[in-house]
Amino acid sequence: MDIQRTMRAALAASLLALPSFGFAQTVLTVTNSENSATYTLEELLAMPQTTVVTTNDYVDELTTFQGPSLRFVLEKMDVDQNANLKMVALNDFASQVPAEDAFAYDVILAVLRNGEEMSVREKGPIWVIYPMDDNPELQDDVYNGRLVWQLKSISVE
Amino acid sequence: MTHRSRLIRAVFLALFVGAVFFGIGVIYKLGNEVRNVQTAEQSDPLWIGSQLQFELLRLERDLGEVALGNKPAEAATLRFDIAWSRINILKEGKLSRLLEEFQIDRSVLADLEATFMALEPRIQGLTASGLSDEMRGQQAGTILTELDGFDQALREFLLALAHAKNDAMAEFRTGMLSLSRAVAYLGATILTLFGLFVFLLMIELKVAKNTENEMRMLAQEATSASRMKMNFMSVVSHELRTPLTSILGGLALLKVRVGNTVKDESILKLLDVASRNGDRLLMLVNDILDAQALSEGKVSIERKPADLNEIVATAVESCHVYAEKLGVRYRITTTDDKMITLTDSARVTQVLVNLISNAAKFTGSGDVVEISVTRNKQVARIEVTDHGIGIPADRQDDIFAPFHQINPGTTAGNKSSGLGLSITKQLMDLLGGEIGVRSVEGEGSLFWIELDLVPVQHDSRTASLVPAA
């Protein structure tokens, strides 16, 4: 725990130390017990893209989200299906998400909303999106809490 | 079904339908209430609202840190963006709808956004290079003063939100309470209906039971009435037979006495008529008594080995006088071998006398009634053939029923009880034999009986068969 905490503190500090957000900046850090990977927005956009058209409690109308699937990102790190993910947002809000979700549904790390990048003010740069319209069982409060916006890191536990 | 019970049924049906609709209404309302509470609970607006205040406080803190030079200016711009995103979250999607629904004053959000817009260049300016720490601190300080007062306003906003949410929850609870009352009413209605239903069922059962009892009593009455009738007949017949025997005896004696002295033919004729009718009456009485005994199962059978040939001869002999009066002759064909059967010879004789005298009665004067005894393996068959009026095909099945006569009018001169064949049939059943008839209307009838034979070593048949009419 101590290591994690220091790591997270270091991460936060490094993020805070960075100048204002722009391209070629690290926007996502994925950590598992052994190693960690960092991605810039361009790198995320270069990954195979999945498009999810859905509504949720935080948008007014049917919205098209695009980004790499969480499954793809996890598979790159050899994350087990039974793992638990700790998703942390820019404001240090953390949400526990079972990795299983990524394998059962097309959960994406949306970087484009209706084709446009999202600013921090608009829940960007990364918003975890569940395909709620296609899977009514996802329209539950439990999954609402997993729609982490302003995502900055995923750590596997 | 009476008019009243139909009405009760209709009322029941209406009540049931009403209860069903009521139930559906309750369930529908329950669903609605649950959806409402879900709306109020899901993505808890209070929590999300409080996040705005929280981020504003963090922004103020970071600005303070920047002012003191403890943190780089970039920390403040990130906080600024995050805080702004919290305003946007409250302006979009479900939260915006909820705030509108709760009729909460959202002017604080608009004010804050306007302030943010005004502050944006200055926040960006904090990161500008070439800015001395002192200047940056001053700038941050002025920005902080701009944000003053929003803390209080946001608190009020959140308080209003909390009130609204509480109201919604209270409304939900009231709804649930009324719903639970409705469910209780529904339960009571169903219970009452069930009780009434059981009550109705019990009434119906009782009615059915009463009907059944009535039917049973009627059946009993009918049985006892018929028994009484039979008893009456039996008593009357017995009481008739005794004086009748005396009358007939007296007539016979009188006929012998006066036969020699009285020369008047008409007197003798009158005596003949009297004794003939007396005989017929006696026969009728005997038939009734036989039928009575048979129907009550009082007739016992005494089985002994007997030769059917002899029984036939005896039967024909006893009918001889009667046949002679009618001008009918008998022709008998028997087998040479003895036809030994284990039976009650008196009863078989009774059956045969009945058939033979019937044949004589219904055949024309001067005709010949044929009686034949034949053997077919272990079965003896006795056939009585006449050339009389015959029996219509459609009525041949009925003739063995009691009090049945073919065309009573034409046999007016030879009236009988109509019991003869019924008695015969019952006797044959009792003896374990078969009886039947084959007849062509206008040509004559063939009555036959069959009895099982006692097995014998040789069964050579020497009798010549007489073809049936």
Image (spheres, rainbow, N blue to C red):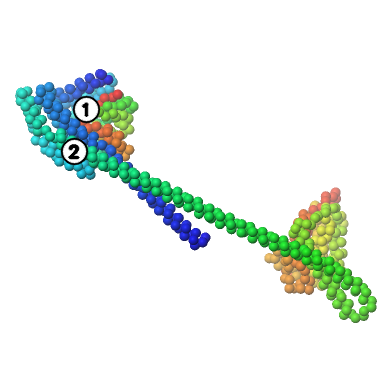
**What is the spatial separation of the Cα atoms under label 1 and label 2, in whole angstroms?**
24 Å
Query: Residue A49 vs residue B351: left or right?
Result: left
Residue B456: % across, % down: 84, 50
Query: Residue B405 vs residue B182: left or right?
Result: right
Query: Residue A15 vs residue B313: left or right?
Result: left
Picture residue at 22% right of the left edge, 35% below the top: B48
Label 2 amino acid?
A: Phe
Crowd around label 2: few <14 · some 14–19 · many ≥20 (10 Å): many
Asked if B152 appears above or below B223 in the picture, the reply is: above
Query: Residue A119 vs residue B306: left or right?
Result: left
Asked if A19 appears above or below B31 in the picture, the reply is: above
Quadrant of residue B323 in the image? bottom right
Query: What label does residue B258 carry, if any?
Result: none
Residue A91: % across, % down: 20, 29
The number of numbered discs placed on residues in the rendered structure image is 2
Picture residue at 77% right of the left edge, 69% below the top: B416
Residue B231: % across, % down: 75, 62
Picture residue at 20% right of the left edge, 31% below the top: A150
The reply to whether label 1 and label 2 mark residues of one chain is no
Quadrant of residue B58 in the image? top left
Quadrant location of the C terminus of chain B in the rendered image? bottom right
Q: Nearer the viewer, residue B5 or B325?
A: B5
Query: What label does residue B157 carry, if any?
Result: 2
Asked if A97 appears above or below B95 in the picture, the reply is: above
For the residue labelled by badge 1, is the local secondary structure a helix, a strand or a loop?
Answer: loop
User: Which chain is home to disc 1?
Assistant: A
Query: What label does residue A92 carry, if any?
Result: 1
Crowd around label 1: few <14 · some 14–19 · many ≥20 (10 Å): some
For the residue labelled by badge 2, is the local secondary structure a helix, a strand or a loop?
Answer: helix
Residue B91: % across, % down: 18, 39
Decide if residue B5 is in sight here: yes
